[in-house]
Structures are given as C-alpha cells and as structure tokens.
Amino acid sequence: FTLVCPPTVTRTTSTTKLSASRRAVLETSMATIMGSLLVTVSPALAEGFEDLSMPTEAEQKQSEEDAMKERLRKKAELQKAMAKPASFKESMEAERKKQESLKKSKEERRNALC
C-alpha cells in the first residue's frame, strides 16, 4: 500500500517540474524572439516614415517662389507659341497629327462597340 502512493506523488511532482521548466523555456524564447523582431523592425519602420512636421517659413516661401517661377515659365511658353504666326501648311500638319492621335485601332473600336 505505501509503495503505490509515493511513486505517483513523485511522478506528479516531476511532471509539474517538467511543465514549469518547459514553460520557462518557452517564455524566454518568445521574449527573445519578440525582442529581436523589435530591434530588426524598428529601423525599417523609422526609415519608412516621413517627417510630418510643418515646413518652416523659409521652406514655405521657397516652395511658393518655385511654384510661381514654374507658372511664369509655362505662361511665357504659351504666349510665345500663340505669338508665332502659323502658316496654313503648319496648321494642316498639326491638325493631321491631332487626327492621327485620336484614331482608334480596330481592337479599340471593337471594344468600344461591346
């Protein structure tokens, strides 16, 4: 009678100790894995984010000046193009090119009908 009880108690105790040591190993390994992921992912995330702060007054003024210069450049190009008198031959050539660019291929026409 007394021989049967102690082995089961010992088994239960050893099983509990084994479970506790396995749990400790798993917790340690998970903590290590999570720590290594944070270390490796953090620099990648930091590089991916933009600086979301408001631009300084100097930066804002510079961007406005650049935008104004671009608008003035485009305006000058358009005025130059309009000031140049076009001959009949040039205007016919431009119209022909425009018509060719608007032409649809057979496949595009077929798709438009469907």
Image (cartoon, grey):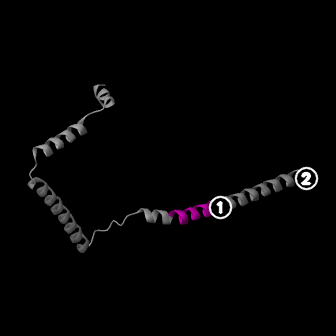
For the point 69% across and 61% down, the residue is 25
Whole-percent x, y for residue 32 in the image? 62, 64
Specify the amino acid type for callout 2. Leu
Whole-percent x, y for residue 49 in the image? 40, 63
For the point 17% across and 59% down, the residue is 74
Of 74 and 34, the residue lying toward us: 74
Magenta-drawn stretch, dominant element (helix, strand or loop): helix
The number of numbered discs placed on residues in the rendered structure image is 2
Residue extending farthest to the top is: 114
Quick check: 67 above or below 91?
below
For the point 28% across and 25% down, the residue is 113
**In terms of image quadrants, where is residue 100?**
top left
Front: mark 2 or 1: 1
Quick check: 85 above or below 103?
below
Which residues are the magenta region? Answer: 29-41
Of 23 and 81, the residue lying toward us: 81
Specify the amino acid type for callout 1. Ser
Compared across the picture, whether 104 is left or right of 2 comes to left
Q: Cα distance, mark 2 to mark 1? A: 40 Å
**In terms of image quadrants, where is residue 95?**
top left
- Dot 1 corresponds to which residue? 29
For the point 61% across and 63% down, the residue is 31
Quick check: 95 above or below 62?
above
* Label 1: few (<14), some (14–19) or many (≥20) C-alpha neighbours in 10 Å: few
Compared across the picture, whether 55 is left or right of 1 comes to left
**From the image, which quarter does the C terminus lie in?**
top left
Whole-percent x, y for residue 5 in the image? 86, 52
- Dot 2 corresponds to which residue? 3
* Label 2: few (<14), some (14–19) or many (≥20) C-alpha neighbours in 10 Å: few
Whole-percent x, y for residue 58 in the image? 24, 74
Q: Secondary structure at mark 1?
A: helix
Q: Which mark is residue 67?
A: none
